[in-house]
Amino acid sequence: MMHNYLYFIWPFKQEILLLLAIFILLLVQIFVDKPNKEWTMQWVNLFLLITVFTGFWQVGYTSDVSVMFQLSPLIAFEKSVLAFATYLISLQGYQWLKHQTYFIEFYVLLLSSLLGMFCMISATHFLFFYVGLELSTIPLAILANFHLQKKQSSEAAFKFIVSASFASAIFLLGISFLYGSIGTLSFNAIATQLNVNPLSILAFVLLFTGLLFKISVVPFHLWTADVYQGSPVIVTAFLSVVSKASILFVLLNLLLNVFYSLEQIWHLMLLILLLLTIFVGNLFALRQQNFKRFMAFSSITQVGFILVAFMGQHVLASAAVIYFVVVYLFSNLCVFGVISLVSTTTGKENIADFKGFYQSNPFLAWVLLLGLFSLAGIPPTAGFFGKFFLLLSGIQHVQYFSWITIAALNLIITLYYYLRVVVVIFQRDAAAEIPKLYISYPIKVSFFICIVGVLLVGVASWIYQYIFTLDFAAF
Amino acid sequence: MNEGLIITLLLCLPLMTFVIIRLFFGIRWPIFSGYLATLILLIITFLSFLIAWQYFFIYGKINSSYALFVPIDIKWLVFTRQLSINFTIIIDAISVMMLVVVSFISLMVHVFSLAYMKGEQRYGYYFAYLALFTFAMLGLVLSGNLFELFMFWELVGISSYLLIGFYYTKPEAVSAAKKAFIVTRFADFGFLIGILIMGGLANNFDIIQIITSIGEQQYLWKGAAASFLGMSTLTWACLLLFIGAAGKSAMFPLHIWLPDAMEGPTPVSALIHAATMVVAGVYLIARFFPVFQMDVTVLHIIAFIGSGTALFAAIIACTQTDIKRVLAFSTISQIGYMMLSLGVDDNLTGIHLGYSAAMFHLFTHAFFKSLLFLCAGVIIHTVHTNNMHEMGGLRKQLPVTHISFLVACLAISGIPPFSGFFSKEAILSAAYNNHKWVYAVALITAGITAFYMFRLYFSIFWNKPVITTLKKEGMGLMQLALIVLTLLVIITGYVPFGDFISANGKPVLLEVHFGFSVIPIALSVLGFFYAAILYYRENNLPSSLEKSFGWFYQTVKKKFYIDELYLFITRIIIFKGIGSSIAWIDKNAVDGAVNTSSGITNWLSVFIKKLQSGKVQQYAFYFLIGVLCLLVIVMYTF
């Protein structure tokens, strides 16, 4: 009998771990008077790491597609990536979280949001998908408000929740039209029954834009800069890495499987949107003074480049996107980790404040440099390989390659503004504005992981190979 | 000896030198690291001569034509079953020739630098970077895989960046390094996309396999189905590759970084920005020559850009007063020659001289141009200025440099019996047989070249009376390097180059016809005399000429305002125009209300007002408009 129960439990292995962590946190909050912050953080991080490793445990893959939930090696891997990113962010937030009164609530919200993303990725039915989407969004709005004494933070939260509800409304409208069109919301049924007619196109466009909002594709990006700037840095990091990655994973499944019959439509839409996204992101990033705002616009551009890969064939596209997300995770967290540290200890967030940063904090300057180089795609950092595969996938369609070329030429502007920051950091004549910073142990660990990631994910080809084989099995 | 082993050694030695010196010896024992690096390079040069000798005289020739060998082929990045990137080394005539040139010039520059850089603060690091560059350049010429080639290509760029910015306390050097980095990166993105198209469509990154696959499936590559803006996929791929090559080789309009790169130490200019790295673009096109030959359009574009650049840079060189900049423009002009020579080898007339001629010129140019730069190094070392108006009458103080410089000037002007004459003749006859206009431009350029080179020569060594206060040069490592190179400039012209290197591996006869040579020699001599009249003695002819040319002279002196044009586009249009208007929108849409107000109460009221006035609603509104626009477009199209 025991065996049978386990059979039902295995597919939810990662979700159950997260739920467990959330429940324990709540119990600690209720029953422990003054919980030991350090200890609590340690075991939550441990839980996250276990969640990462469980993803590689070869059990619980579902073959039955009639239910609302599926798990395949690829999906388990995607969840592991998200959990790992959350783990790194949690490490980087150490110094900031230590001074927070409501740090248990912070973790509960963070893990709930992650749980929502897990549900979303595994969903095979739009109802369940929607539950996941909301579960991932609403805690984020509260997290954005976590700088409790700052007005900017509550403004960010307010803007986020209002915009997100609007996007959700559009998304729900899309779902209703979809239901009206084919009478079911199951992914499997949509994939087989959907055909091109005005109603289904309308449904698709609404549903699709609702999701594009979350990865801040232009023109649905307006909330991004405000929310990024206002939120605490580690929440910004979570928004820009984990939240975006989850939606990208979902889009892979939706576009390449579920809505594949509308391929031509979303190709056209993506082409317009990605060009717009890359251009606008680039041009806005050029003149930003605030580092977090700068990262907001540069991450918009990065998403534009990721969209390029969607134009390719199934396996190549999916492998390129997932691989790039892994690369992006490390490079972006290099940058956000440093910003977070600087912002929590000195409160400085402008690019100009980093003048002569190399003199006072050589290690942090190198971390920042590696992260920025990788984001700019300079070989031999992982970012170069990531961009390489994105473009390689996008260029497969010969009729689009001129557009993809135009998109790729934008890499130069991208390079320019990343270099601008690097130049500021390594300026030698100016006196450093930021004093030597103390780097606590967990933060150091996260930086080492990120550096190794940036330097090795590209050159160690087995990582791409692994992702590719997973994709190959999935499609 | 085993080829694979030698080549492994050849690549590992400089890399190890770089790592060891950079990490351990650089600061503590600078002098020792200099000698260590030079010694290692001596071994490398010996090994490359060994490879060259074995290839050309022992095993390279199969059925009376030089074949291509792959001594190393290691699986490097195995991405998928279909897509893997190997670490491949290829040995053929051009890679072996480049191997010899790179290692030998690098050795000479090392020897020269031992004395030249003495007393520099970062003496040790300098040699570390030189070793890094040597490694990258050797890797580049030996690469048999397009992706691998690109990695080395970037690495060469990075080491060049490090060396241009070597005097990092000088703001000019830093901005020059940045400029070089950004301009070449711009071109490299073109190159990268070219690689993606070639590799993606041939489903392989191996250079040999790409070439065969394109050759076999020409219909697919040239097919109209895959065309864009009226050009086929093949044309696009070749053009993009050429953009990469043009960036590295400083072809118009991407030439702007090279003159500024002269801010680096002079021996570095001799090695990187004259003899080796800048000809990487020429080498790249030679490497893909079978592909380029399938597409005459691109070849012709190369020929036109090459000849245009040759003339354009030569004209600018006549007006520059910084001696290193004159040499930089002459480098651009000479690379233009090589490019045009490749471009005219278009398979239409059946005469294949261009390819061999280009490679020949690359070979001889490496020697005389690095000699010129090293001479310039000695001169700058003696008089402590780059400005040629502040020089004059140096022939007594610098006898060795004087003779070397004269020989190199004669060689670059194409006056027999020096090496430049033979290679330039080959290029001119290749151009003559294929394209008369290109030939005419090349001919005029030859005359101008003689003029500006001897303008330089006379201004430095004659012109003013001999200055007696300066010390006479002794005989040291610097002079040793000059003498060796001078001897080579004299002999290299007699190498029967066509026998060794040609487009299809079969010997080509690069002969010199007396009747054909008369015109170019006459033009060069004319240029020489013209320069002699103007600059042999100090007089006011040059300045009155400058006056009579007026605005034209100014335009040329300002390098046709190309740099200003770029600055205008980047600074004014992109930055001020687009950038700041967008920043304005961003600012006013977001923080504008905050900034204009002052005081907490005011701030608070504005804050509330801002929420009421519906910034977020505005966002939602844009969102909705976006959705509607998309819907309209999609519905309209389908």
Image (tube, coloured by chain):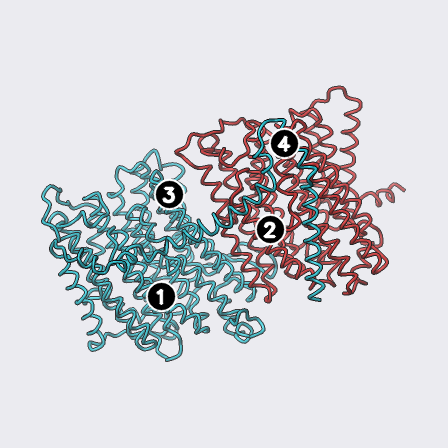
Chain for disc number 2: A
Q: Which chain is disc 3 placed on?
A: B
In percent of width and height, residue A230 lies at: 63, 35
Label 2 sits on residue: A462
Q: Which residue is mark 4?
A: A93
3D distance between C-alphas at marks 2 and 4: 31 Å
Q: Is residue B467 visible?
A: yes
Mark 3 vs mark 4: give the one in front.
3
Chain B tint in image: cyan
Marks 2 & 1, CB-CB < 8 Å contact: no
**What is the distance, in whole Å, between disc 2 and disc 1 at their CAs?**
43 Å
Q: Which of these two is toward me, A181 or A151?
A: A151
Chain A tint as drawn: red
Residue linked to disc 1: B306
Q: CA distance from mark 3 to mark 4?
A: 36 Å
Q: Residues within 10 Å of mark 1 (few under 14, many from 20)?
A: many
The residue at 56%/39% (across/down) is A334
First reached walking from the N terminus: tag 2 or tag 4: 4
Q: Are marks 2 and 1 on the same chain?
A: no
Identify the residue at the far bottom of this view.
Answer: B349
Figure quadrant of residue B24: top left
* Residue at the outermost right position: A1
Return the residue at label 3.
B174
Marks 4 and 1 sit apart, C-alpha to C-alpha, by: 56 Å
Left or right: where B162 falls relative to A348 = left
